[in-house]
Amino acid sequence: MKRLTPMEIFNKDFKQAMRGYDVNEVNEFLDLVIRNYEEVLKENEYLKEQLTTSKKQNTARQQAVPNMREYDAVINEILARLERIEKVMR
């Protein structure tokens, strides 16, 4: 399904019928739809940018993980030694 643009909504013409809708009311509602749709499109673009940034940051973190694993091993070894020292001191 093709996505509508705000201009397509704005330029949409409706046939007038004998017992049709109030043209001004329809136009006011379409103006509201256009404003909301533009906001949604802007928000969608912002969120896409944020997702791209987050993915890049996540990739950088994943590349740093091998180093983090080494640090974790050292930290765990230090904690184990501290626990043994605390047991001996008691």
Image: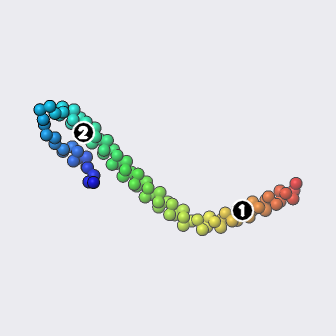
Q: Amino acid at mark 2?
A: Leu
- Image quadrant holding the N terminus, namely bottom left
Q: Which mark is residue 76?
A: 1
Q: Quadrant of residue 10?
A: top left
Question: Residue at left 67%, top 63%?
Answer: 72
Residue 69 x %, y %: 63, 65
Please tell me whether residue 34 is drawn above or below residue 88 in the rendered image: above
Please tell me whether residue 38 is drawn above or below residue 61 in the rendered image: above
First-in-chain label (2 vs 1): 2
Residue that label 2 marks: 30
Question: Residue at left 54%, top 67%?
Answer: 63
Residue 32 x %, y %: 28, 38
Q: Which mark is residue 19?
A: none
Number of residues whose C-alpha sits closer than 10 Å to that of mark 2, classed few (under 14), some (14–19) or many (20 or more): some
Q: Secondary structure at mark 2?
A: helix
Q: Amino acid at mark 1?
A: Asn
Indicate which label's residue lies in the foreground, 2 or 1.
2
- Image quadrant holding the C terminus, namely bottom right
Question: Residue at left 33%, top 48%?
Answer: 41
Q: Residue furthest front?
A: 19
**Depth check, front residue: 80 or 24:** 24
Number of residues whose C-alpha sits closer than 10 Å to that of mark 1, classed few (under 14), some (14–19) or many (20 or more): few
Q: Residue furthest left?
A: 18
Q: Secondary structure at mark 1?
A: helix
Please tell me whether residue 31 is drawn above or below residue 47 in the rendered image: above
Viewed as shown, does residue 30 lie left or right of 71? left
Question: Residue at left 30%, top 45%?
Answer: 38
Cα separation, mark 2 vs mark 1, equals 63 Å
